[in-house]
Image: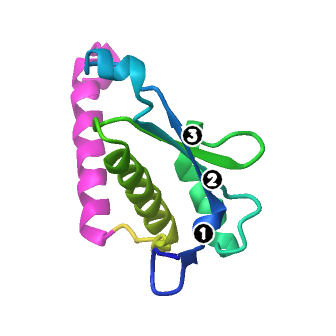
Amino acid sequence: MINITPEIAIDKNEIKLQFIKASGPGGQNVNKVATAVQLRFDVKNSSSLPDDVRTRLVRLAGRRMTESGVLIIEAKRFRKQEHNRQDAIDRLVKLIQKASEKPKARIKTKQTRASKERLLAAKRHRSKIKRMRRQVSISEE
């Protein structure tokens, strides 16, 4: 079991790890050893996640989520397979923790009386400036 929050825990059987060859530096070791990890977690069919967390996780995952609802995380930062495996699991845990945080409800604020008065004063000032630019007609004198 992988504990994410006190309420949420994921069974290790729900996570599928596949080791692939990593690109980048490492010399001949890169060509011989599959050190990169591709973690797959079926978000859509997971019984461990509450519905609200699932919907936020789908939104947070973005392009890492497939059309069938599988989250794919690739880890190839380290040269050792075990480090990459742990890195992928840590990234999954952080993503689910972020999704488990309920967003704060926005509280509508009212415009203060002083801010309304400042706005109207600025409009009056601008109006006066534009009025002064007009041509003076003989009837106004």
Residue 135 locus on image (x, y percent): 29, 13
Hey, which quadrant is residue 52 in on the image?
A: bottom right
Q: Which residue is mark 1?
A: 53
Q: Main secondary structure of the magenta part?
A: helix
Mark 2: which amino acid?
Val
Q: Secondary structure at mark 2?
A: helix
Q: Which residue is at a point 37% across and 43% down the rendered structure image?
A: 81
Of residue 40 and residue 6, the one placed in the foreground of this image is 40
Q: Is residue 19 above or below residue 92?
A: above
Q: Which residue is at a point 31% across and 49% down the rendered structure image?
A: 83
Q: Residues within 10 Å of mark 1 (few under 14, many from 20)?
A: some
Q: Which residue is mark 3?
A: 64
Of residue 138 and residue 122, the one placed in the foreground of this image is 122
Residue 37 locus on image (x, y percent): 47, 40
Of residue 51 and residue 133, the one placed in the foreground of this image is 51
Which residues are drawn in magenta?
Answer: 112-141
